[in-house]
Image: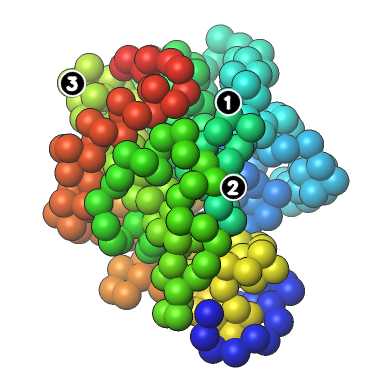
Amino acid sequence: MGCGKSKYEKPKELKSVWHPKYFEGLPRMEGKVVAITGCTSGTGFVCARDCARLGATVLMLNRNSERATAALEAVKVAAPGAKVIHIPCDLMSFAAVPEAAAKIREAVGETGLDVLCNNAGVMASKDEATKDGYDVQMQTNHLSHFLLTRDLWPQLTKAAELRGEARVVNHSSLARKGKKLEQKYLGKNGGNLGGDKVGTMPGSGARWERYHQTKLANLVFTLALRDRIVTAGSKVKVMVAHPGVAATELQVHSVSDGGMSGGVANLIVSQTAEDGALGILMSCCDPAVQSGGLYGPGGQGLKGMAKLLPAAPEEKLADEASRTLLWEASEEATGRKFAI
């Protein structure tokens, strides 16, 4: 995929620029409960660690693994005295998601859930189906998060009633830009969506088109959920973030799996995981965020301090037809209606 075949076996080493000062200005979060998917490393780990450091109870949703155990312990070390809980969650299984939601309900009790951060994601994976028959990327990055949000809506509503608001935070990408959302990527077509080839240009080919569709789905879901929240008069907010091109395990896995070359990874990675996490951290913690807003680096979007980005281009990308398509297709895929 161009730019040579150099190795990329661990995230690029960079220095955080914007994160340290921004974190110092965030309010305390005692009494709040934050659930985060995909937080063994990268932006999800940073968000989990920082919410715990701010005093929140943090539920770390990861598959059972040594990495999950190590991440849990690392957060506890970074935030002594914080309540941090591992919740087993396999986003490649629709059966596993309700089980995770049940464990979260048990953990939060009558206090509700203040923040659900749908962070987990895979990138440029092979054209394979989950055991449910859906594209690995679409089920992991969007469909299972749709189901998780649906299953935890009563707990989010409870927190909003008790403390004035609750939040859903979705994690998109620069890759959201491109073609309109297509139904076939949301359907039971895993393994039949273009194959494993990558294009001659970075970020092109079938693997990357599937990834694009999932990251666009994150944006579309955010705006479709916002519309329903407004209609219902709910106090739950929903935001979406993008990390720029941050140094995480996503690139490492993509290189090892054939999704990009090491040369491309070294060329495009532009900031640390801490700086890349600022969009979701802001969306989870900052009092001033706007429901429906996209938070991340501006300009070319590769790096920079996260900020609220202009709404018009995102509203166009995630138009009304796309929002209707996504909601109906997601309900059909998960087998559950999601009514606000």
Front residue (pair 36, 6): 6
Quadrant of the rendering where the C terminus is positioned:
top left
Q: On the rendered structure, is 181 left or right of 158? A: left
Please, is residue 29 above or below residue 94 in the view? below
Q: Which residue is mark 2?
A: 128
Disc 3, SS: helix
Q: Say which residue appears at 25% left-offset and 51% top-offset.
A: 180
Q: Could you tell me the amino acid type at mark 1? A: Phe
Colour mode of the rendering: rainbow
Residue type of the residue flagged with mark 2: Glu
Image spot of residue 42 (x, y percent): 63, 58
Residue on which disc 3 sits = 231
Which residue is the site of mark 1? 94
**Rendered image quadrant of residue 325:** top left
Mark earlier in primary sequence (2, 3): 2
Tell me the kind of residue under disc 3.
Thr
Residue 45 sits above or below residue 157 on the image: below
- SS class, disc 2: loop
